[in-house]
């Protein structure tokens, strides 16, 4: 049991978009492939002010999800928590520090 297991009380499914061909109207609808399931995460709603301070003035981030770093998690662009899909707008990778492992925090929009 790691230190962060105390805080990561939710489970998430990480997904990545697969490019597809456009339909007859030229609209491309992405298909999503699962990267990892049942990943322990912590989801936190954030205010507009905090979002703008952390992710930039034009930020649309309304939730943050924190989790331990897993390989290739930078390519994730959709996260599903409790059957609710969230779109990844931005992410920040934090290096390992003392007893804390390397982690990643995603900025999400519903």
Image (cartoon, rainbow, N blue to C red):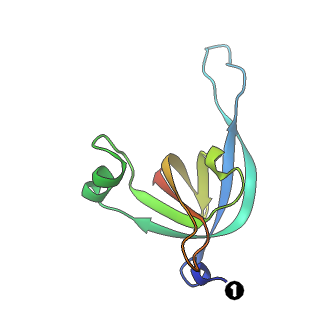
Q: Residue at x 59, y 83 (%)?
A: 3
Quarter where residue 36 is shown = bottom right
Quarter where residue 77 is shown = top right
- In this rendering, does residue 49 appear at all? yes
Taking the image as shown, residue 67 lies to the left or right of residue 21, namely left
Q: Nearer the viewer, residue 94 or 76?
A: 94
Residue 41 position in % (x across, y down): 59, 69
Which residue, given by chain and number where applicable, does mark 1 sit on?
A: 1
Helix, strand or loop for disc 1: loop
Residue 64 position in % (x across, y down): 45, 61
Q: Quadrant of the N terminus?
A: bottom right
Residue at the extreme left of the image, as rendered: 49
Tell me if mark 1 has few (under 14), some (14-19) or many (20+) residues whose alpha carbon lies within 10 angstroms of its own.
few
Q: Nearer the viewer, residue 40 or 97?
A: 97
- In this rendering, does residue 110 appear at all? no
Relative to 40, is 70 above or below? above
Q: How many marks?
A: 1
Residue 107 position in % (x across, y down): 46, 53
Q: Residue at x 29, y 60 (%)?
A: 47
Taking the image as shown, residue 71 lies to the left or right of residue 41, namely right
Residue at the extreme front of the image, as rendered: 98
Quarter where residue 29 is shown = top right
Relative to 38, is 48 above or below? above
Q: Residue at x 60, y 48 (%)?
A: 78
Residue 91 position in % (x across, y down): 50, 51
């Amino acid at each position: 049991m790691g230190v962060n297991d105390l805080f990561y009380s939710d489970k998430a499914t990480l997904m990545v978009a697969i490019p597809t061909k456009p339909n007859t109207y030229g609209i491309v609808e992405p298909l999503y492939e699962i990267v990892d399931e049942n990943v322990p995460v912590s989801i936190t709603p954030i205010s507009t002010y905090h979002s703008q301070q952390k992710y930039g003035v034009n930020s649309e981030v309304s939730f943050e999800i924190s989790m331990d770093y897993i390989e290739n998690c930078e390519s994730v662009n959709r996260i599903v928590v409790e059957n609710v899909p969230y779109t990844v707008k931005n992410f920040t990778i934090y290096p390992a520090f003392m007893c804390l492992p390397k982690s990643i925090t995603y900025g999400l929009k519903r």
